Amino acid sequence: MSSTPFFLIFLPYLFFFSSWFFCFSSSAGFDLTPISFDEGYSPLFGDFNLVRSPDGNSVRLLLDVYSGSGFISSNMYAHGFFSAKIKLPSDNTAGVVVAFYASNGDVFEKAHDELDIEFLGNVRGKPWRFQTNLYGNGSTSRGREERYRLWFDPSKEFHRYSILWTTKNIIFYVDEVPIREVIRSDEMGGDYPTKPMSLYATIWDASSWATGGGKIKVNYDYAPFTAEFRELVLDGCPMDPIQEYPDFTICNDKDAWLDTRIYSFLSPKRRAAMYKFRQHYMYYSSCYDVWRYPVRLPGCVIDPIEKERFNESGRLKFERSHKKQARAAKARRERKSRSDT
């Protein structure tokens, strides 16, 4: 038997997958129209830790020992495409969470809808992880989390993260790679988000759960932690959520326009990209977590091949291989950095 270390055997494959995603992400764009911060947003909390750029086109959110910070869209939207280029804090970020999400929890406290992208910090030398989630009509007891790793270091440069929400489906994107699609079904019923939502971005102390199940807390010796946002996109239909009888027909034209956009449907090429991402970077899925949900969640589409990779806790059966992938990616980035210098 060959004594070649697994790391060296796997490295060419990791390079292939990373290069494949890079080429896909750098292809023809989504043709987006960014807006300035003041055109679409306002501070939410921690105003003293929210720093706009001089031209108003980007914003930094800071977390220090006194407070986190965040911003919110000026309008609520009935469906839309919400997007931003984000660069995450570097160094020791354990316990820190950066969130980019849509919600109406401030209006419908007991029956809120939500679509989440949450970045979970880590100890120095270990990569950021992130999760997606959705709730409809207050279905917080039926969280639909998926957790992933990335094929790049999100603290080194900006990458685009996007949420598409239509009457038919929800798609989460990293750059132009779709990573998750939720198709609306009768089975989901009220668990599918339907009420108008605002768009939020926040950075905050989640020491109670974010890293190691809450065992590793935020170390403020590394503060301030800074998340940067730019090229903000809000393509949706503004709507007043508290009308007694909301007229959703006013959004018909905008919904029809959204349906024509390239990001609203998955071509065979994009569907293949999503499959590759999920195969190599997803390490937890609530759809396969039978310990937490003995009865399958409504709307879960079980992929027999994908299911084989997960145990009954919803986590990968062979998570060590993913950790080796992450180490290989880090080594490759370090070699590239040395060669560039």
Image (spheres, rainbow, N blue to C red):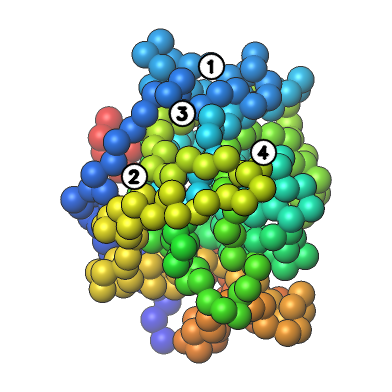
Identify the secondary structure beneath mark 2.
helix
Identify the secondary structure beneath mark 3.
helix
Q: Nearer the viewer, mark 2 or mark 1?
A: 1
Q: Nearer the viewer, mark 4 or mark 2?
A: 4
User: In what quadrant of the picture does the N terminus appear?
Assistant: bottom left
Quick check: 30 left or right of 211? left
Tell which of 212 and 34 is nearer to you.
Answer: 34
Image location of residue 329, percent across then percent down = 41, 54
Mark 2 belongs to which amino acid? Answer: Arg
Q: Nearer the viewer, mark 3 or mark 1?
A: 3
Q: Do callouts 3 and 1 mark residues in contact (Cβ within 8 Å)?
A: no
Q: Is 213 above or below relative to 239?
A: below
Q: CA distance from mark 3 to mark 2?
A: 41 Å
- Provide the residue designation for mark 4: 96
For label 2, the crowd category at 10 Å Cα-Cα, with few meaning under 14, some 14 to 19 and many 20 or more, is: few
For label 1, the crowd category at 10 Å Cα-Cα, with few meaning under 14, some 14 to 19 and many 20 or more, is: some
Q: Is 324 above or below relative to 63?
A: below
Q: CA distance from mark 2 to mark 1?
A: 34 Å
Tell which of 84 and 82 is nearer to you.
Answer: 82
- Provide the residue designation for mark 2: 335
Quick check: 268 left or right of 86? left
Work out whether mark 4 precedes mark 2 in sequence or the reverse, and give the earlier one: 4
Please name the residue shown 53% across and 77% down the image: 185
Q: CA distance from mark 3 to mark 1?
A: 16 Å
Quick check: 116 left or right of 38? right
Work out whether mark 3 precedes mark 2 in sequence or the reverse, and give the earlier one: 3
Task: Give the farthest residue toward the top.
Answer: 54
Mark 4 belongs to which amino acid? Answer: Val
Q: CA distance from mark 4 to mark 1?
A: 19 Å
- Provide the residue designation for mark 3: 40
- Provide the residue designation for mark 1: 51
